[in-house]
Image (cartoon, helix red, strand yellow):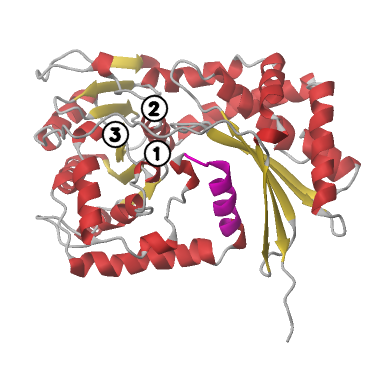
Amino acid sequence: MLGPLFRAACLSAAALAPTVSFAAEEGVTTFTLDNGMDVVVIEDDRAPVVVHMVWYRVGSADEAPGESGIAHFLEHLMFKGTDELAPGEFSDTVEQNGGSDNAFTSWDYTGYFQRVAADRLDLMMKMEADRMRDLVLTEEVVLPERNVILEERNQRTDNSPGALFNEQQRAAQYLNHAYGRPIIGWRHEMETLSLQDALDFYELHYAPNNAILVVAGDVKVDEVRVLAETHYGPIAANPAILERDRPSEPPQLAERRLRYSDPRVSQDYLVRSYLAPERDPGAQGKAAALVYLSDLLGGSSATSVMGQKLEFESRKAVYTSAFYDGLALDTTTFGLVVVPVPGRSLEEAEADLDQVLADFLVDGIDMAQFERIQSQIKAGQIYALDSLQGRASRYGEALTSGLTGEDVQAWPDVLQAVTPEDVMAVAAELFDRDRAVTGYVTRAQEVTQ
């Protein structure tokens, strides 16, 4: 999956070099600046607005050992000012121009976006290019912001038993890969993150040849090209940036199990997860089949296999679900959730789940349900085109996860080409208890003195 993005579509220095278009009917065009920055333009003139995004091919899974949370920490620090902008001035300027902005960090990418009137695109590019290489950080800025991310962890993770359990299960899932680390970071490592850590991470990873510019909205390709070359073009590439080469997972030879107890848990539940294939360039078929498997087993409670069997027929569960997201640079996960009815133990709930999976592998797929899901997936792909930001994110997330523009364009057709046989094949390959992590989340009994 690793490798430069769009290298076949690179342009020469001339502004009039040919443009490569993935799908003219969608108005999607890509080109590459001389410094290696990839650009995707999505023309959509339904409203006089534009979404401007810069996605960096770096996330928490690219952090050095002992520095968990630095990718997310730097995301916060990117709003602290440059040689031209005072701390907070970036977002203030966006707001004063009637727009909104934000940022996000994942295991595979970090992204920054603004949504503004189309005639403000020039200003957005100017400011974003400024902070790509001219961020100004001092101890007076960094240390207070470190307290902010520690409080964020406190609110979102440490005060949530579900979030704490998810951290533990993910750590058990990945023995060797950095996907086992939380995006926000382990608290004891976050507490030691320094100004120099932030500067080193910034200097290494924030450069045009490690970034993708996505512009969607009421724009024309030639206009975006001129602005991109004006603002991003002068920024030098960083030759120290290499292809991402991460440790892979060793073969899992035995089931892993964990039990997490917390007095804040309102109702006991079971989660089981398996390592699963991600979407790969030119090879998205297995991931597409896993999308169907997730919906078939744990989509709507009223129609899914787990919902019908455990919630409605036997009434052994109050909630069931399945989850899968194939957008990842490396091997991802497929998960199942069962919340048993009061009085039914998690051991019994696990036996119920195993029986449902065993029956599914024998009985196969109900064609009416399969065709219904196929229609729902097709409709979802069409409706997604209504969201300008969603369309931009669709490309940014995929391209920073190792896919190509052609893969993004092909995905709807790949999904529609999935057959019931494809789904049963990936299910038979996936559901191996020796390659699973099974977790119990229970309400701890409070001890009275």
Q: Which residue is mark 1?
A: 108
Label 2 vs 1, first from the N-terminus: 1
Res. 205 in view: yes
Q: Which residues are magenta?
A: 163-176
Within-10-Å neighbours for mark 3: few <14, some 14–19, many 20+: many
Could you say whether the residue bearing mark 1 is in a helix, strand or loop?
Answer: loop
Q: Horizontal and vertical percent for residue 356?
A: 82, 34
Please report the residue visible at 8 percent of the width from the left and 34 percent of the height from the top: 234
Q: Which residue is mark 2?
A: 402
Cα gap from disc 3 to disc 2, whole angstroms: 19 Å
Q: Horizontal and vertical percent for residue 291?
A: 61, 28
The outermost residue toward the right is 314
Please report the residue visible at 40 percent of the width from the left and 42 percent of the height from the top: 61
Quarter of the figure with residue 96: bottom left
Label 1 vs 3, first from the N-terminus: 1
Q: Do the numbered discs 1 and 3 sit on residues whose CB atoms are within 8 Å? A: no
For this view, does 237 lie left or right of residue 245? left
Q: Horizontal and vertical percent for residue 224?
A: 20, 30
